[in-house]
Image (cartoon, rainbow, N blue to C red):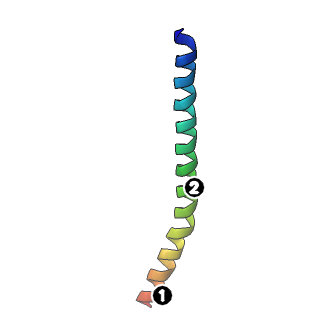
Amino acid sequence: MAFPAQRLKIGIVISTAMSFWDDVVNAGRFLRYLLPAMILTQVLITL
């Protein structure tokens, strides 16, 4: 009886980890475009 519940729990953990990883990847992509833009803005302001 423990098997289906345990499998479900593992499935939930895996799907949560996957969606979390997707968020991390998306944040990384966002930061990769955001940081150069911020640096460019800073350079333009200082000039």
Residue at the image position 48 percent from the left and 82 percent from the top: 41
Residue at the image position 50 percent from the left and 69 percent from the top: 35
Please tell me the numbered disc located at residue 8: none
Binning the other alpha carbons within 10 Å of mark 2 as few (below 14), some (14 to 19) or many (20 upward) gives few
User: Can you say which quadrant of the picture contains the C terminus?
Assistant: bottom left
User: Can you say which quadrant of the picture contains the N terminus?
Assistant: top right
Q: Which of 9 and 14 is in front in this view?
A: 9
Q: Which amino acid does label 2 sit on?
A: Asn
Q: Which of 9 and 22 is in front in this view?
A: 9
Disc 2 from disc 1: Cα separation: 27 Å
Q: Which residue lies furthest to the bottom in this view?
A: 47
Q: Residue furthest top?
A: 1
Quarter-wise, where is residue 19 in the image?
top right
Residue at the image position 52 percent from the left and 63 percent from the top: 31
Quarter-wise, where is residue 7 in the image?
top right
Residue at the image position 56 percent from the left and 23 percent from the top: 8
In this rendering, position of residue 37 left or right of residue 46: right
Q: Mark 2 points at which residue?
A: 26
Q: What residue type is labelled 1?
A: Leu
- Residue 24 in percent (x, y) is at 52, 50
Discs 2/1, front: 2
Quarter-wise, where is residue 14 in the image?
top right
Q: Do the residues labelled 2 and 1 touch (CB within 8 Å)?
A: no
Judging from the image, what secondary structure is the residue with disc 2 in? Answer: helix
Q: Mark 1 points at which residue?
A: 44
- Residue 16 in percent (x, y) is at 53, 38
- Give whichever of discs 2 and 1 has the lower sequence position: 2
Judging from the image, what secondary structure is the residue with disc 1 in? Answer: helix
Task: Please tell me whether residue 29 is drawn above or below residue 9 in the rendered image.
Answer: below
- Residue 9 in percent (x, y) is at 52, 24
- Residue 43 in percent (x, y) is at 46, 83
